[in-house]
Amino acid sequence: MIRPLQATDAPDVLALLSWMDDAPEREVFAPDARDEHELRSECEDRVCLVAEGLDGAVQAYCGLAPFRDGLVLEGPLGEGDLPGLVARALERAEGLPVYAFAARDNLAAREALETCGFTPMHTTDFYAARVADLARHARVPEGYAVTDHLAPAAYRALYRAAEDAWAERLDWTDAELQAHFARDDVRLVALTRQGQPVGFAELELNAAEARADLTYLAVHPAERGQRLGRVLLALAAAEAAAHPELRTLRARAHDHARPARALYAHAGLTHCRSVVTYLRDDTEGEA
């Protein structure tokens, strides 16, 4: 039976989240909460469904949360009739685009998503290495300087020149950009030449996981071919090394981003996981 999540289901959903955490191949987009109070708060005012087995025990979870221009599917997480659970959640999507994310090796979840009309958009590969191994190569090339700040207009210009598809950042206001880089867990490492920015790397520091995430790396097209990507990677690692609790640096690249994938491989990062991004958009083709 598929029904709305109840407060008394929190322990069962937390058990499903723990089950997912224990095996990378079960990964899907899921609630961040890992205790009952946080889970109830996170699921408040959201579409959250569970599937019961014949014995009445919760077998699977699925939900919808606001995301970008539409919604994101949480799950499907668990076992049993996953396509049926996803289909019931989609009935509550109100025609909005719905994104979903699943580990490449999570075949059960991916089959459920594709059965329900989700289309794979791309695969994101994640790479990791020890911070200390990368940081020891940090240097600023002759003729360049490093800074931890860029004016919003300069940031946007370089971001736009990098021709990346992650274009929603271009819609941020000056205040939103400044607030982002003022966060305690965010760092910017930018290279300039003759006072002009030529590339930057962004980090998010995750002390709880002892990890720094390289969320973005950009080099101006006119400056490519000079190994500045590897320079920025090492400088970002040196920034992470200033925080002794951070031991691992993790980077990501979409399947079409061949230069980034080559950069990480040549720098000694090891592939550690892959996540497939899906979209179901019933609005496509509408006038």
Image (cartoon, grey):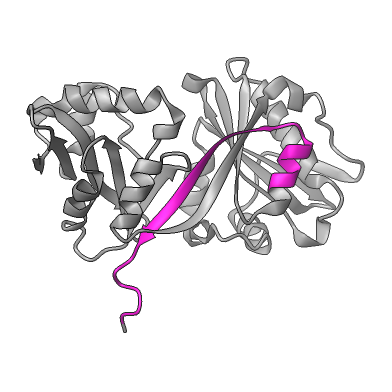
Return the residue nearer the eye: 276 or 149: 276
Looking at the image, residue 272 sits to the left or right of residue 208; the answer is right
Coordinates of residue 74 in the picture (x, y in percent): 29, 43
Quadrant of the image containing the N terminus: top left
- Magenta stretch bounds: 261-286
Quadrant of the image containing the C terminus: bottom left
Tally of numbered discs: 0
Q: Please say whether residue 6 is one of the residues in the magenta stretch.
A: no
Coordinates of residue 70 in the picture (x, y in percent): 31, 59
The reply to whether residue 146 is visible in this rendering is no
Coordinates of residue 257 in the picture (x, y in percent): 65, 54
At a point 18% along the width and 24% down the height, the residue shown is 12
At a point 63% along the width and 52% down the height, the residue shown is 151
Coordinates of residue 204 in the picture (x, y in percent): 54, 34
Q: Residue furthest bottom?
A: 287
Q: Residue furthest top?
A: 244
The reply to whether residue 286 is visible in this rendering is yes
At a point 29% along the width and 51% down the height, the residue shown is 66
Residue 49 image-quadrant placement: top left
